[in-house]
Amino acid sequence: HERYSGGRHLRDSEEVEPPSVGLAMTLERFGFPLGRLKTGTPARLDGRTIDWDACNIQPSERPALPFSHLRQSRGEEPPLAAVGNLIDCYQTATNELTHKMVMDYAHLLPRYDGMEGKGNGPRYCPSIYKKVERFAERKSHNSFLEPEGLTSDVVYPNGMSGPYPEEIQQKIFRSMKGLENVDIFRPGYDVEYDFVNPQVLTHTLETKSIAGLYLAGQICGTTGYEEAGAQGIIAGANAGRSAGAAYRGESAPIPFVLGRDEAYIGVLIDDLVTKGASEPYRMFTSRAEYRISLRADNADLRLTRKGAEYGLVTDPERLAALDMRETLIGDNIERLRTFKLFVTDWAKRGGNDLMGGAAANRPGREGHKKSAEEILGMPNVNLKDVERIMADVFEEDKETTESESDSFDSTPSSVYDTVEASVKYKSYVVRQEKDIESWRKAQGAKIPPTIIYDHAIMPTFSKEEIEKLNRFRPSTFAEASQISGLTPQSIVYLYHHVMKLNKESRQKARETEASR
């Protein structure tokens, strides 16, 4: 069967990994709906043959911020960063000669099963051929040269995937600055693969038809390492909990599911199992209606306790660190809430432009006070500015009252971002909730069949969204919300746009009636 030809488009595929044809045949035999997608990876370059001095350095972040909130709470850097063992990435770019070769040798690219031979690949991680074809007006595209390890000479040229014959790949790379003499360790390749329509899965990623069978990764129609890893967490946790309960002779455990309001993992899985995947799915912040609340700085606050509740987080130190962070965040926000000055004093100490401008000095404002929390919520004001003023006032009060109280302690770096973001985004979170509620109530509302979907009218919509709205022409907002790739924010925008059109239509009808 043509579908099972796994790696025939994969350059030297058998040397990398043989195709899992038997698995695809088994899945189809059990009635799983299969589709065809493709992905690609660029060549790996020999770093010893790169002219690094000709490229633009992209240094590592210093000091390096660890992903782990546990390390942050200890004030630690990642271990290798702590001893200064960091490596840098570099930037180079394609040019007009590169683009000419990319197009001249396009006839050597493989043909695929999907999309009339073009293959159904990632929209947002296109091959170098796709980039040159789509953006013909561009004279260059950036490529970031990423060393693959501290002790390895292998370099990953980000943004340069393209399954040309190896000698052509080398010609293309050697047309770029800094790569004039580069050698290839392993040529880039594409693979076209089978995937299962994820609508046959539950939110635990267990298949609906076969109990105990869980799917995660590209088999569910996603693309990207992080997307695959995120699914692996959920599928693995549920499979492990279910298998453990069965072994102990216990009833089935409560499913471990993350909601759209709890995590990007929840958004990703909900999109997949409710809308399916018509093309390789990639996670973007714009796909989440609660994205203001889903931040890296509060990931532990959102998820650690839930992980502990389901037996996935058992480290006492991690839970103690969470308790400490929650207390520090609460105490520092409360301090901002209770510290108040007259608006004129805020403006005097922080500068008119920073603390409200001329509005702070309007007649009648002299007796009006604002809290540090309210001031921090203003544009262009950061926590450091506010705490500097708070510290000055604290020191002045000590001198006036001859107090021996402790000095003013600034918000610790381990909670700084969370305290600032919690205050800054407070009003936006409230508005976010109102927007979500408005379009939820409007699920059954009609969308006029004559509506025009165009960037000139809807400038905030992506090319993908305009394309899919024109293709599917949803008649209600409920239908629109089921279109994969259409973000919640765009549905809210569409809702307000339709309400405006309806209002204008009613107004015009009244004017016509009145003129008779």
Image: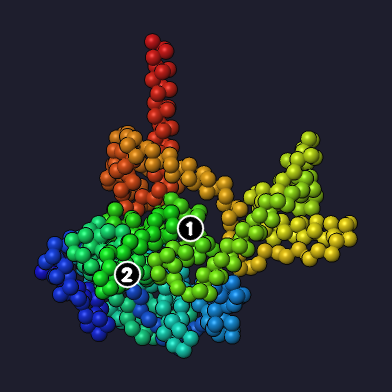
- Report, in whole angstroms, how far the alpha carbon at label 2 lies from the one at label 1: 26 Å
354 or 296: nearer the viewer: 296
- Evaluate if marks 2 and 1 touch, with contact meaning CB atoms under 8 Å apart: no
135 or 230: nearer the viewer: 230
**Marker disc for residue 164:** none
Q: Would you call the spot at circle 1 few (<14 residues within 10 Å), some (14-19), or many (20 or more)?
A: some
Q: In this view, does 315 lie above or below 271?
A: below
The residue that appears at 73% across and 52% down in the rendered structure is 339
Residue 382 % position (x, y): 66, 57
Q: Name the residue under label 1.
A: 294
Residue 253 at least partly seen: yes
25 or 467: nearer the viewer: 25
Residue 216 image-quadrant placement: bottom left
Left or right of 358 in this view: 474: left
Left or right of 338 in this view: 103: left
Earlier along the polypeptide chain: callout 2 or callout 1? Answer: 2
39 or 43: nearer the viewer: 39
Q: Is mark 2 on a helix, strand or loop?
A: helix
The residue that appears at 25% across and 57% down in the rendered structure is 199
Question: Farthest residue toward the front?
Answer: 249
Q: Is residue 275 above or below residue 152?
A: above
**Marker disc for residue 241:** 2
Q: In this view, does 342 lie above or below 58?
A: above
Q: Indicate the amino acid at tag 2.
A: Arg
For the C terminus, the image quarter is: top left
